[in-house]
Image: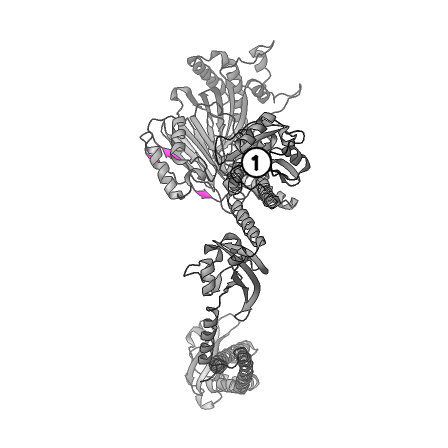
Amino acid sequence: MRSIAGQVFAVQVLLVCLLIVAATTALILQARIDSEEEALNRATAVAQTFATSPGTSSAMRTQNPTTLLQPRAEETRKRAHLDFVVVANTHGIRYTHPKPEYIGKTLVADWRPVVKGKIVTESVQGPLGREVQATVPIHRGDGTVAGVVCAGMTAADVSGRVERQLPLVFGSAAGALALATGGTALVGGRLRRQTRGLGPAQMTRMYEHHDAVLHSVKEGVLIVDSHGRLVLANDEAVRLLDLPPDAEGRSVTELGIEPRTAELLASGRVATDEVHLAGERLLAVNQRSTRWDGGMSGSVATLRDSTELRALSGKAEVAERRLRLLYEAGAKVGTTLDVVRTAEELTRFAVPWFADFATVDLVDPVLRGDEPVGSAMRRTATCGIRSDHPLWRVGKMITYSGTVPQALGFGAGRPVLEADLRTYEGWQEQDPEQATKIVKYGIHSMITIPLRARDVTLGIATFWRSEKSEPFDEDDVALTEELVARAAVAIDNARRYTREHAMAATLQRSLLPQGLPEQDAMEVAHRYLPARAGVGGDWFDVIPLPGARVALVVGDVVGHGLHAAATMGRLRTAVHNFSALDLPPDELLAHLDELVSRFDQDQAAAGTDAPGISGASCLYAIYDPVSGRCTMAGAGHPGPAVVLPDSTVTFPDVPLGPPLGLGGEPIETVDLELPEGSRLALFTDGLIRDRGRDFDEGLGVLRTTLAGLPERTPEETCQAVFDTMASSHPGDDIALLVARTHLLDPGHVAEWELPSDPAAVARIRNEAAEQLSAWDLEEVGFTTELILSELMTNAIRYGCRPSRVRLLRARTLICEVADGSSTSPHLRRAATTDEGGRGLFLVAQYAQRWGTRYTPNGKIIWAEQPLTAPVAPLGERTGDDLLDQWADLPG
């Protein structure tokens, strides 16, 4: 049987031959196509040249065109290396031909379209055989066609051109075959060297011998690839590590191996006689890198069971004990970022492992997340084998002084061992009575170790023995010192987290709304719950808008911590600023998107490593209590839930735009008509998504919850939704905003059409005064007339139709004048010699607020007057004096 190299050589040579044959055939076919195309192009060019040459058109009008055209056609054919150039009249009768006997006969070509001015290329069966030809028209001076010219070559001539190229093609194919065969021979030779010239049967026998040896040795062998997947494990390795039957091909971190051993195997680093635990076994692990399969990299590890050596070496016993202790401590101490919980985990782990009692005292500021200052400590955690011990209880403030071990250890930053408490007097100085109780209780040995992390002492850990007869020794000190050092790092991490969490929570509380503004359009309630990992960037807002409207906002910033809280504050401030411009939701979110992009660009230019804002989301809705219409738009944020008065729950199809900062797509709005008493629930995705619950399931739970709350107030609805859907420690922030809509009483709305006639100002002003009297608002009548007069006059002079005047009686009195112009007036102070320009100044003086908002059909200029505060005094001047300032006000 041939070797593997020989079989590969034969297969590759066969494949190369097939590829060369296919390539040669394709080249010949392509050459034929190219030659025919070239012949057509040349024939077309020659025919066009002949048709447009001087004398051709005039020769067609002579009595005997053949006499003039035949010599010229033959001369052109020979020079152009064509087989024929034929001239015919518009009826297809030949005037010329290489064979004179065909002159006067009908042209073999599709000449009819040519007579109409077209050019025709074709392959036909002509007098010379199979011909490839082009036919073009001969134009007279007036543009009409006088005849046609047909030029071309025979198919045999075209094929001859291809056949002249065949030697080159076949030569190239032979060269390629030679090169490919040589390359294949080189590959085969290399494969023969790598396989030692073995055939399949020989390699199978060699694998069987290798397999028998590998699985019979009493040392575990593991091969792991560069991706941490187990490639091979012999029987001994399976036994030592208790591997599952399907272990090969899986990641070593998924096989139930001790984490420290799995980390070593997955890392591929070099190891020499490292001691690792595997259940009750103590394994010596050696690992080296290796390559196989022609270049794949990985590592090979050998495992040797050294459990029997423990009986022969005291050092091995100490190493196993220390390793087991520290290994389990890493898994049980520091599982949370809570200072007190970490201290309790340290004491619970030490008892009864190597101590009967354990206490932890921390410097008091550490418990609040601050830097340790002073020496006053608070007993933070205590654990013992019995609860009736005489040690100080949790919460007691302690200041160690003198020569007591805790004071010495805290001051020097080193452990202090008191092997026999009954013979040492110094430790009793802190509280002799307490010391006597401890000795009588049976506690006889103590180790005090300072909790130090990053060169800072956080407190003191003390370990006591009573029922264990052997006292603590130096080996116990070394082991305990390493355990406490790890716990100290965990406590310091928890302290830092506590400080950062407190700072972030304080910042976020200051950035979120401290209270909801007063407005009549909606009754609103809200809830906010930070994530278990810390405060984040979820936020909400309620913003009163002109015209008795109100805006509801809910947003979400990706991430947690100070950066997310600060980013949330920036976005909330930006939304407030943009809403002051009274922009529609889609325009406001577009401006916010541009602002976020600019924030990210500035941050990238500054080179900071803080995460970008891109990916934040926002939902912005505006509700108008006059019309009952709610307009909203979203940027990467889920739409709200709408609860109708009959308890029907719907989720409106709000067009989902891209998150803020990504841009690229326009943001669209949706309008909803909401009946009186409808409830809107705006939320962040933390309310919907939770452990074991996806987004669709969360929406279903929310729908069911809201549908089961008929006639509930927003406050009750918020609480019920939170009780049902929010866990006590959510994985993401939760913000919920519930609003119940109100419609403005139609009797509190008065509207007038404003004609372009200035005389209408006085009429509408009088009618407005009558309406204010009907509303019992005579005290604001005069200032309202001033405001309306100025706004209406400006609309007539500078605006365009249609114009409209509206009075709204809500929490404030709102005057609105709408017109079809998009030009906004500007406040200025008029000079004493100016005839006009004082009107808006007076509006600003006597209105609480005023401004302009734009509509699809123009603009609305509005002014608000308080109904609960007294009207600003007019001074010594009367109303007539004020009206006389306006030269442009009609009488």
Res. 788 in view: no
Q: Please, is residue 267 above or below residue 511 in the view?
A: below
Q: Is residue 860 magenta?
A: no
**Image vertical order of residue 563 relative to residue 217, above or below:** above
The image quadrant of residue 246 is: bottom left
Q: Kindly indicate the quadrant of the structure image that contains residue 770.
A: top left
* Residue 253 picture location, percent across and down: 48, 55
Which residue is drawn at the image coordinates 58% and 34% (left, top)?
A: 499
Please report the bounds of the magenta region as a residue range.
639-657
Residue in the image at 54% along x and 59% along y = 284
Along the viewing direction, whichever of 251 and 738 lies nearer the viewer: 251
Horizontal and vertical percent for residue 415? 64, 39
Residue under numbered circle 1: 444
- Residue 303 image offset from top left, x and y in percent: 52, 61
Is 302 above or below relative to 512?
below
Q: Quadrant of residue 703?
A: top left
- Front residue of 558/744: it is 558
